[in-house]
Amino acid sequence: PASAPAGPPDEPGAPSTPAPSPSPSDGAGGLPPGYRTHHAPEGFSVALPEGWERLDTSRGSGPAYRVVFGADGDPRTLAVTYSERVGSDAVA
């Protein structure tokens, strides 16, 4: 007896199994590889690339402060501005 066809052939270029989804974290606190959590004494936390540290803290207007993070030899920086006083608009 004749056997039934096995089904349509795979489409050219189509993967036979789905590609794995990229993982955004290494499982250690939800941070991507190469990052660590910095806990600032002012009460906030921020994920920083390995090798980055606090570079400067300056006082702004009123009760506002600015903390700058970066690494030696890297022109990129991250500035976090925060206030000791909460206003009616958290974004202002």
Image: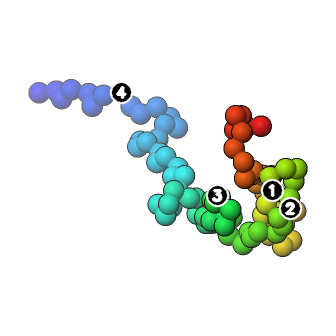
**Badge 2: few (under 14), some or many (20 or more) residues near its Cα, within 10 Å?**
few
Disc nearer the start of the sequence (4/2):
4
Front of the two marks 4 and 3 = 3
Q: Looking at the image, is 40 positioned above or below residue 89?
A: below
Per the image, the residue denoted by label 3 is 44
Residue type for callout 2: Ser
Please, what secondary structure does the residue beneath circle 1 have? strand
Q: CA distance from mark 3 to mark 1?
A: 12 Å
Residue type for callout 4: Pro
Furthest residue to the left? Answer: 1
**Badge 4: few (under 14), some or many (20 or more) residues near its Cα, within 10 Å?**
few
Quadrant in the picture for residue 32 = bottom right
Please, what secondary structure does the residue beneath circle 3 have? loop
Front of the two marks 1 and 4 = 1
Per the image, the residue denoted by label 2 is 58
Disc nearer the start of the sequence (2/3):
3
Q: Is residue 3 left or right of residue 51?
A: left
Q: Which labelled disc corresponds to residue 65? A: 1
